[in-house]
Image (cartoon, rainbow, N blue to C red):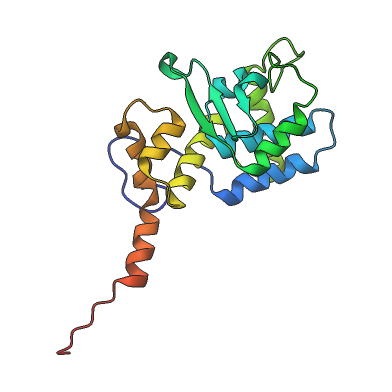
Amino acid sequence: MSRNGMFSSSKKLPDYHSPEEIYKMIDEAKKDKSKKAKRNRLILETLWKTGIRNSELREMKKRDIDFNDRIMIVRDGKGGKDRVVRMDEQLSSLLGFYTDNKSDNDFIFPGRNDLEPLSSRQLERIINKYADKAGINNSFPHKWRHSFAVYGLKQGMTLRSIQKLLGHSSLTVTQKYLQLTDDDIKRDYDQNMEFKNPYG
């Protein structure tokens, strides 16, 4: 059985977080008073609101962000292709303040120093830190990417838009998320499809 109670196909469906789980983890990051707390919160916000990959987030530099148009340019993404990723006003504003003193070639989320990016293991530790505090199990960067895709579809975004934002080469890859939104179809059906026989 899948998460929403549907029988799964032969291929395993992506695991994802509910928005409530996501915001519990972000809230734990907001409460954090450590030196890297602001960076860590923005990492979570960026994963949630853009759907970018682990490596794409870690390699992002200030020059790759257009704060006026609220876009990120993912350079040399999967398949060596560049793509445009959108941001909402809140994330754009938070990143603008956070990177105000950074140069264009600085990593947005540096590792041990400003000259090297965050490592994959460091990113996983950051996510695990707040997942543990929020009492949420099995959280990892790609699960946040799945969460973005499922949430976008449930909010009414088209499959084509999700494909472009995630950087999938084929729409077929993106279609796997449709199976995770069947709960909405059930809800719409139950609420709107009332069959009344006029003859009793």
In this rendering, the answer to whether 31 lies above or below 105 is below
Q: Number of marks in the image?
A: 0
128 or 179, which lies in front? 179
Q: Residue at x 69, y 16 (%)?
A: 104
Residue 61 in view in this figure:
no
In this rendering, the answer to whether 121 lies above or below 69 is above
Locate the C terminus by quadrant: bottom left
- The percent position of residue 123, horizontal first and vertical second, equals 65, 24
In the visual, does 95 lie left or right of 194?
A: right
Q: Residue at x 65, y 38 (%)?
A: 45
In the visual, does 71 lie left or right of 151?
A: right
- The percent position of residue 59, horizontal first and vertical second, equals 60, 17
- The percent position of residue 78, horizontal first and vertical second, equals 44, 18
Q: Which residue of the protein is positioned furthest toward the top in this rendering? A: 115
In the visual, does 36 lie left or right of 139?
A: right
27 or 106, which lies in front? 106
- The percent position of residue 167, horizontal first and vertical second, equals 43, 27
